[in-house]
Image (cartoon, grey):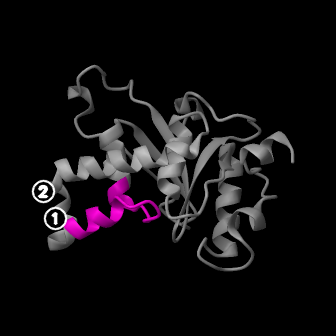
Amino acid sequence: LGPLAAAGVGDAGGNDDGACFGDGDGPYGSRVDRRRLRLRLARLGLALQRCEGDGSCLFRAVSAQLYGGDQAHHGAVRAAAVQHMLEHRAEYEAFLGEDVGAYLTGMACLGTWGDELTLRAVCDALRVVVHVVTSDAEGWYTFYEPEGMSEHKGQEQGQEPHVFLAYIAPVHYDSLVPAGQRQQHKDARSLGL
């Protein structure tokens, strides 16, 4: 294995199709979706840094972005998101209704898939701007900014870290790095999205 493969960084040219998502259609999206994402990332000069598909991929991808490629901090990222949701329960009840307690209990468990609500909580809890490039045909780029960033003690607006994620519909997240880069970038803002 070369240094890129050993580090889990996929090639933006698309040579990691089977290794990353498996063959054919399945839980990591269709061949069409994977190809669309691969081509999109190539145009943007980005490549996938693969994250294990164990239900914690969203948290692993954020960990990789914040800790120099290291996915091992995914539990801490998850815990921060769940704690934020507990502390701001009323904000999430509008989306979850009476099931918010069950949702948070489940989300606290490693292996429970993260979703858009947890992505929002990660953004607010860790005070990061999250950029997501998806495999969707339309509306393929979205971002989340922390609420009240300029009011946050010790940080001024515009100084928050940025993290870059790929989402392959319907259920998998990976970290993004500049194409051809052998190591995880230290300053995600350098991607310039």
Which residue range is magenta in the image? 101-118
How crowded is the residue under tag 2: few (<14 C-alpha within 10 Å), some, or many (20+)?
A: few
Residue found at the far bottom of this picture:
25
Residue found at the far right of this picture:
1
Q: How many marks?
A: 2
Disc 1 target residue? 94
Disc 2 target residue? 90
Q: Position of residue 3 (x, y in %)?
A: 81, 40
Q: Residue at x 20, y 72 (%)?
A: 99
Q: Residue at x 54, y 69 (%)?
A: 169
- Type of amino acid under label 2: Ala
Q: Is residue 97 above or below residue 46?
A: below
Q: Is residue 179 above or below residue 17?
A: above
User: On the image, which quarter does residue 186 sit in?
Assistant: top right
Q: Position of residue 67 (x, y in %)?
A: 54, 34
Residue 193 in view (yes/no): no
- Type of amino acid under label 1: Ala
